[in-house]
Image: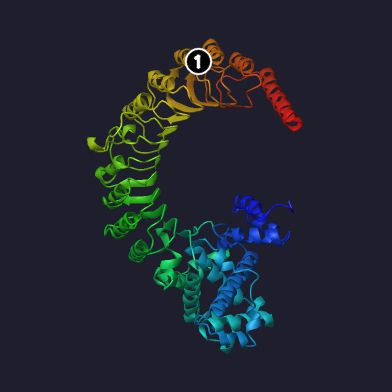
Amino acid sequence: MSTLPGDCLAQIFSYLDEDSKSLYAFIRVNRLWCVNAIKYLWKQPLRFALILKSTPDYTLRHRTKTGKLTETFIKCLIHNEMVSGGDIQNKRRRSPRVPLVSPPLFNYIGFIRRLDLDDLGLAIAEWAEYISSPKYNRNSSLVKVRNVVFSVLIQQRPARYKSIKDFREDKSLIKELTVRICELLINQIQKLDYLSMKPSKPFPASEIFIIHLMKDSWFNIITREYMSIINYPHANISLSHLVEFEWDESRTEAESSSRFLIDLSLVCTKIQTIRFDMNKSQTHDLLISEALQLLIESQTRLEEFELRNCGLFSYHIMHGLKTRASTLKKLTLRKVSPLSLEFISDIAYLYNLEELRYYEGDLLSKDAWPLSFTHFPKLIYYEIDDLFPTSITVNPDAVISDSCPMLQTFIYNQKRYYKAESTALIMRSVGFHCQFLRHFECNAEICSIDLLKLVFLSSPNLETIIITNDRVSLNIDGLLLLTQLKNLKHLELNGSWEFEVEPLKRFLINSKPPLSTIVLSENKCFEDSHLQVLLNCLKGVLTTFHVLKLTKRLSIDMRRQAKEDIEDFLYKRKTNVVED
């Protein structure tokens, strides 16, 4: 490994950019490893420091680490500003206090590519708690560092405070520090790829984080200040190449969020991914929707959009997406409940979609869902999960194809609301228009085996089948006799599916599938004879076999035989791999 060139090391480390422990170990191997690993460790350093922020596991020990990291972060900002000749005057470099903010080993700020505003605010608040702690103030060298940082940032020394209590009660100081740190940060980041606001959940949370949620806490003061980060002088440069934007509305007011989105739309035009969580916002004044529409329409490369926890009261967001139909490839709606069906009818016009997901929305209708696959000739992934079945008013002009040749994954799960008409309409659409499915998953009211026949006969290349039948007992003998699935690798049957031994045997002999995983749950017909057929026909193939809540109990001998056959095959395969 010591002879590998830096380019190879960088390629390897890029796969571990989420693993802070490994990256931290890499920087201590040698200089070459350090140079190539440090940029991934500092790509989003605050997230690593606050990885436990939403859990009770965040302790005072973690606060100390966060405080030290933030102090390093701030000292790097100060040093860079001194070197560049900014408004922190160069004369301070000759000051006896300057050695306390000695030059860092690397320009860490130059490595930052991802910034979460919630993490930034929490890091500053945790640093403020850290430098005001009794343990910190008992160390004279640390106090000198703090005084230098304060005096250089805002030309104000905290030495005048007689007690920590007086320091903590000065709210104006933390406000000034926040503004100064954010100004320096935006001024020195040359290119930011990712910007987000993802607040930590209040419960369960660490006890030491609860203080940040109080009304007059330092953190709330910090939050109000960094919302203006978009208006800092250098923001049009550092944010102009933004690729990914994620926002959670839970901790900001509608007016400030909408202003931020509008300002961002004036600066960024190349965002490829937008994820927006309205946090079940009931914003009838439409401020957020209108601002989000402006942000969407200003992007020339938007490929992925996700909207969560939203009561959709207008057409603005969908009209904005319609203008991006030429570039948009992925659309995800999670717990989005439109007030009117016409607010989401523009989905049909997104003709370049490759992935469409809709989870847990209430569309206030009991009619069938007729959104045809023929609207999306490039669709690869389609998932409807726990969505109230509905009809969407669709303009026939939106239908631009008579098939969906690219669809490979189809998932339709209706656990809360189900209707046979909806299921039948969608299944027929799959059978008629989608011939290249690889993954088929359905948990809905399937009233006829003919629907499954239509799908399985038209999609002979299926690799994964997961079907659930909790309502009507269905016999699939005819389906097994007619179907050949030569690529089937994963089969999961949940609920009351009935099938005899002979049809099962015929299906396995005719198909000869590489069926490595079988899962059966709540089945009423499966017996020892069925298991024997599986072991005989899938010998040397089957690696995973799970049965849950079967009505008929399998004998101990058959269970033992199945376990021995599978373990023997796995052992032989492992041995062969080692020998090769």
Label 1: element kind? loop
Residue 363 appears in the rendering: no
Question: Quick one: which residue is furthest to the top in this view?
Answer: 502
566 up-or-down from 93: above or below:
above
Which x, y percent locates residue 425? 32, 27
Which of the image's four quarters has the C terminus? top right
Furthest-right residue in this view:
579
Q: Is residue 35 above or below residue 323?
A: below
Image location of residue 150, percent across then percent down: 56, 82
Instruction: Tell me: residue 569, above or below residue 359.
Output: above
Amino acid type, residue under disc 1 in the picture: Phe
User: Foreground: 27 or 1?
Assistant: 1
Which residue is at the front of the view, 283 or 96? 96
**Residue depicted at 68% across the width and 81% down the height:** 141
Residue that label 1 marks = 499
Residue located 57% across and 17% down the image: 512
State the residue lying farthest toward the bottom: 160
